[in-house]
Image (cartoon, rainbow, N blue to C red):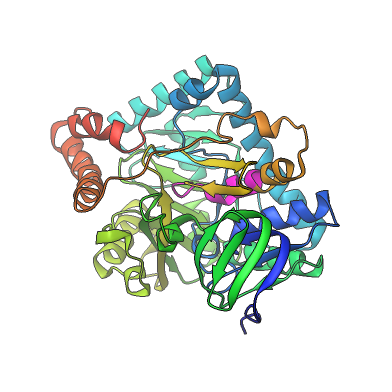
Amino acid sequence: MPRPALPGPASYDVAIVGAGLTGLWTAYYLRRADPALRIVVLEQEIAGFGASGRNGGWCSALFPTSWDLLVKESSADGALRLHRAMHETVREVGRVAEREGIDAHFHQGGTVVLASTPLQLERLVESVRIARARGFSEDDQRMLDAGEARRMLAAEPVLGGMFTPHCAAIHPARLVRGLARVVEAAGVPIFEQTPVRSIGPGRVETDAGTVRAGVVLRATEGYTPGLEGLRRTVVPVYSLMVATEPLDDATWDSIGLGDRPTFTDGRHLIIYGQRTADGRLAFGGRGAPYHFGSRISPAYDAEPRVFDDLRAVLRRMLPQLGDARFTHQWGGCLGITRDWAASVGLDRATGMGWAGGYVGDGVATTNLVGRTLADLVTGADSDLVTLPWVNHRSRPWEPEPLRWLGINAGLRAMTLADSEELRTGRQSRIARVMAPLTGGH
């Protein structure tokens, strides 16, 4: 059952719009930092309704902003500090889950990235070389030969791979719903079924009336375009998933993933998967279209063509699946800013704060957001508030129809890039051309 809706006009010290992981982590750390603050969380649907509750279950140190942009915003040392903060954030999520009794099936088994073609292997070797030059060590990212990679995940074909320990597999809905219960038990009200129409300095306009607050924090990610005046702030792009029935031990012995590393490969069109705690394969990817005008609809959560493609890709990768049934399929939207940069910030003059633009890498990033916003709101002098993504402002997306044409062209280009490489045996020219438009370094 949904929690009660906001009963009417109200006044708080801090109003948080959105009860996904961004809003809930922020409420959690704010309450711990200053128990006297009167905090409220306002949610249009139910806590965790969006990407927070239906993602791929990667609590990963991946960060969407390009290294070059982070350096431009600060320095190479600043970029490195941010990535190190993300490494620590993965562990922090596990610590909080254990401390607060949130059974989110958290297990830090890392991530294995497979190379199924010589070109993919070249790109992995180059990514590790660049990582070393930036200050990361073998303990952060290392190459795997074909045998090592196959022992982690016996996919077809495997020419090698790369491994990083900085990722945990989780059950996303368990994490966000457990966090909501913890926040509520700490005395922070969460009002669900409370649509917010607009926000501004000192106010949040809802269907139940105006909420007054000295600080208003926007935590709406892919749903941001539904707020008045913010349609071009981020675009909602859909990612879809499928999951198998629980697999038997013999099948798992033939597949691998014994330590539950999350997995992907080196193709351009993103795929991602994990072995769940109850023995399923959960597998997702991009490819669903962007909808004109940044529209969001439950109907867009299902794209039969994409679901079919995901099942086909996974069966080709893992023929060991045999006739295993796929029992679940779902989808949802993530948020992308125009420069593919995540940010967190607070305008002290207006009391308006924000966070988002995770490009699908938000499960851990939201925790770093929560700690950072807590420090910004309370005025704490911490290392977190000096990281290069703090108070970054992305420029708006283009108006329609340019937005629709450009985004869908980019999505289509990544599919064509993979086909081009298989056909020519050379690195894709399409991918090189599109890299600046799709967050490439």
The residue nearer to you, when weighing 12 against 431, is 12
Magenta stretch: give its range.
Answer: 358-369
Task: Tell me: residue 192, above or below residue 157.
Answer: below
Task: Tell me: residue 195, above or below residue 151.
Answer: below
Q: Quarter of the image containing the C terminus?
A: top left
The residue nearer to you, when weighing 391 against 152, is 391
Q: Where does the image place residue 5, in percent across and percent down from the top left?
A: 62, 80
The residue nearer to you, when weighing 393 against 27, is 393
* Number of numbered discs visible in the structure rendering: 0
Residue most toward the bottom?
1
Task: Tell me: residue 335, above or below residue 43.
Answer: above
Q: Residue 368 is drawn in which quadrant?
A: top right
Q: Where does the image place residue 220, in percent across and percent down from the top left?
A: 51, 58
Whether residue 438 is visible, yes or no, is yes
Q: Is residue 438 left or right of residue 278?
A: left
Q: Where does the image place residue 395, in percent across and percent down from the top left?
A: 38, 39
Q: Where does the image place residue 391, in percent across and percent down from the top left?
A: 56, 36
Residue at point 75% right, 69% down? Answer: 184
Q: For residue 361: magenta?
A: yes
Q: For residue 360: magenta?
A: yes
Residue at point 63% right, 41% down? Answer: 349
